[in-house]
Image: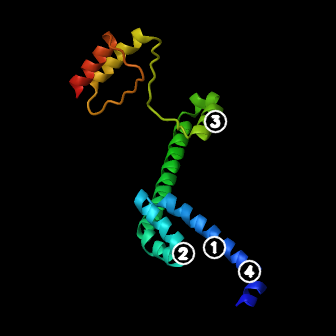
Amino acid sequence: MKEFLEQHHILILILETLYFVGIILLSAKIITDTKTTSKTLAYLLLIIFLPIIGILIYFFFGVNYRKNKFYDFKVERNEKIYDDIKKFIKSSHHKVLESHQKELQKYFSTFSFLFNATQSPLTDSNTVELLINGEEKFPKVFEVLKSAKHHIHLEYYIFEDDYIGQELSNILIEKA
């Protein structure tokens, strides 16, 4: 036995190195994949103190193959839906460009740049009203809020307890 170990010490050293690298990689997988701390610690101790048996136990009981298969299916399905949405957006963008070709010819490169850079499509039947300051903005905001029927999506970072803030909160309370 001693002669065998002396003759194959390089091979044994390589196998030990591969084993330790494998344990480190498997430990990283256990840490990233296992949700609870106690399970993570249990699997780590298992593969360290019962090397071969612990690894087998982890692969039989610790890896949820059914969940992984379902997740892979979900990722595939989401990618297909995302591709379909991208195709629809692209086609609707091009339809609007074609239907208003004369009016938009001058700005074609701008619209193409915006679409290619941000996937922001050109849409039909939009209106824009520029509101320069708060005196123009807030009466219009309050009017639109009062006419809302189903949903209100509103985002402000600063909300003061002044006339405008109180009016806004009164409208939202009334709508709720």
CA distance for labels 3 and 4: 60 Å
Mark seen at residue 51: 2
Q: CA distance from mark 3 to mark 1?
A: 53 Å
Closer to us: 52 or 108: 52
Q: Is 149 placed above or below 163 here?
A: below
The amino acid type of the residue labelled 3 equals Phe
User: Which residue carries the number 4 mark?
Assistant: 11
Q: Amino acid at mark 1?
A: Tyr
- Residue 63 appears in which quarter of the rendering? bottom left
Residue corresponding to mark 1:
19
Q: Is residue 109 left or right of residue 91?
A: right
Q: Residue at x 64, y 67 (%)?
A: 21
Closer-to-camera residue (112/54): 54
Provide residue 109's location: percent of width, then percent of height: 65, 33
In the picture shown, does residue 136 fall above or below 8?
above
Q: Secondary structure at mark 1?
A: helix
**Residue underneath mark 3:** 113
Do the numbered discs 4 and 1 sit on residues whose CB atoms are within 8 Å? no
Residue 97 % position (x, y): 56, 37
Residue type, label 2? Pro
**Label 2–label 3 contact, CB within 8 A:** no
From the image, which quarter does the N terminus lie in?
Answer: bottom right
* Marked residue nearer the N-terminal end (2 or 4): 4
Q: CA distance from mark 2 to mark 3?
A: 57 Å
Give residue 135's mark.
none
Among numbered discs 3 and 1, the one appearing first in the sequence: 1
- Asked which colour scheme the image uses, the reply is rainbow
Q: Is residue 145 left or right of residue 66?
A: left
